[in-house]
Amino acid sequence: PETSGEAKGTETSQNLNQQLKYHRLGTSQSEDILVYHIPENPTYSVGGQVSEDGEYLIIGIYNGCLPENKVYFYKLNGKAYTDTEVISPVKLVDEFKAKTYYITNKGSR
């Protein structure tokens, strides 16, 4: 799209109301299942990764470019979830105080 004379990369619009969704390969994007979103904080961004053992979905929640984040997780239990299930994540770090990283887990720890 045309940038109306602005230099590329200088846009200031913001990506609001981010959602983390589950997509099954070979299906339409319209069938994706909503995993996590924060409608009460539309400026927060979310990202997810699955632990190496496939047991946990780790969610990082970020407030802009601040070097702080929250970390939540879901125990996957090897099952496929549907969009009709409401499952709350475990809140491992629930404050924006520091930059927290998931490194690994050993079993349930």
Image (spheres, rainbow, N blue to C red):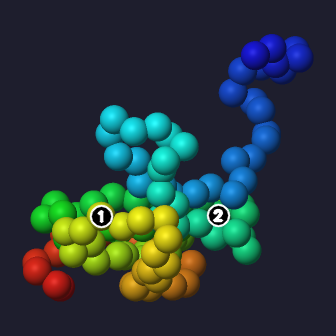
Mark 1, other Cα within 10 Å: few <14 / some 14–19 / many ≥20: few
Counting the numbered discs, the total is 2
Q: In this view, does 96 lie to the left or right of 57?
A: right
Q: In which quarter of the image is the N terminus?
A: top right
* Quadrant position of residue 42: bottom right
Name above or below for residue 81 compared with residue 20. below
Residue drawn at point x = 89 percent, y = 17 percent: 4
Name above or below for residue 57 compared with residue 33. below
Residue 51 is situated, as x and y percent measured from the top left of the image, at 22, 64
* Quadrant position of residue 66: bottom right
Are discs 2 and 1 less than 8 Å apart at CB? Answer: no
Q: Can the viewer see residue 48 in this picture?
A: yes
Mark 2, other Cα within 10 Å: few <14 / some 14–19 / many ≥20: many
Tell me the SS state at disc 1: loop
For marks 2 and 1, the one nearer the N-term is 2
Residue 87 is situated, as x and y percent measured from the top left of the image, at 45, 80
Residue drawn at point x = 39 percent, y = 39 percent: 27
Q: Nearer the viewer, residue 42 or 79?
A: 79
Q: Is residue 106 left or right of residue 1?
A: left
Tell me the SS state at disc 2: strand
Query: What is the three-letter code of the residue carrying label 1?
Result: Ala
Residue topped by disc 2: 44
Q: In which quarter of the image is the C terminus?
A: bottom left
Query: What is the three-letter code of the residue carrying label 2?
Result: Tyr
Question: In the image, which disc is placed on residue 80?
Answer: 1
Q: Can the viewer see residue 65 in this picture?
A: no
Residue 76 is situated, as x and y percent measured from the top left of the image, at 27, 72
CA distance separating discs 2 and 1: 26 Å
